Amino acid sequence: MVGDRDNRRSITRYVFTIGVKTIISVSKLQNIVSLSRMEAEYVSTTEASKEMIWLQRFMDELRKKQEMGNLYTNNQSVIHLAKN
C-alpha cells in the first residue's frame, strides 16, 4: 500500500473507538521507506500499538479506567512476526 509513489513511503492508518464513537483517527505517511508490504504493515501495527499504550495511560490519568483494547491487523505475516 504505497501512499506516495514519488518517494515510495507507505501510509499508516488506524482508528480508536470507545463504544461506537471514534476518538482517534490517523492517516499519515510513514517516516521510513519499507522494503516490503509486510514491513510497512508491521510499522503501522507498531505505531498503532504505541498509540494504544499512550491512550491507555492517558485514560488512567483521567481516572477513566478502560479495558485494554484489541489491536487487529489483517496481515498474517505481521501476526506471526508480532507473536515471535
Image (cartoon, helix red, strand yellow):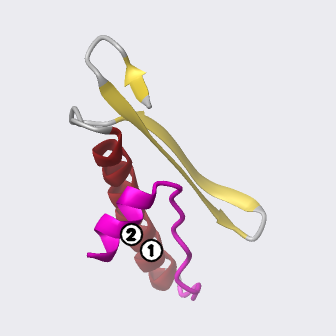
Which residue is most to the right? 20
Residue 32's spot in the image, x, y percent?
21, 36
Q: Quadrant of the N terminus?
A: top left
Q: Residue at x 35, y 39 (%)?
A: 37
| Place of residue 67 in the rendered image (x, y in percent of width and height, measured from the top left) | 58, 86
Q: Locate residue 43 relative to residue 16 in the image: left or right.
A: left
Q: Which residue is mark 2?
A: 54
Which residue occupies 39% across, 73% down?
A: 53
Q: Magenta stretch mostly in which secondary structure?
A: loop
- Residue in front for this viewpoint, 52 or 46: 46
Nearer to me, 48 or 35 = 35
Relative horizontal placement of residue 49, taking residue 8 as reference (left or right): right
Foreground: disc 1 or disc 2: 2
Residue segment shown in magenta: 63-84
Q: Is residue 72 left or right of residue 77?
A: right
Q: Quadrant of residue 16?
A: bottom right
Tag 1: residue type?
Phe
Q: Position of residue 31 (x, y in %)?
A: 24, 36
The one nearer the camera, 49 or 24, is: 49
For the residues labelled 1 and 2, the Cα–Cα distance comes to 6 Å
The answer to whether residue 2 is magenta is no
Element under disc 2: helix
Q: Tell me how many marks there are.
A: 2
Quick one: quadrant of the C terminus? bottom left
- Classify residue 16 as left or right of residue 42: right
The residue type indicated by label 2 comes to Trp
Q: Residue at x 74, y 60 (%)?
A: 21
Q: Which mark is residue 58?
A: 1
Magenta-drawn stretch contains 81: yes
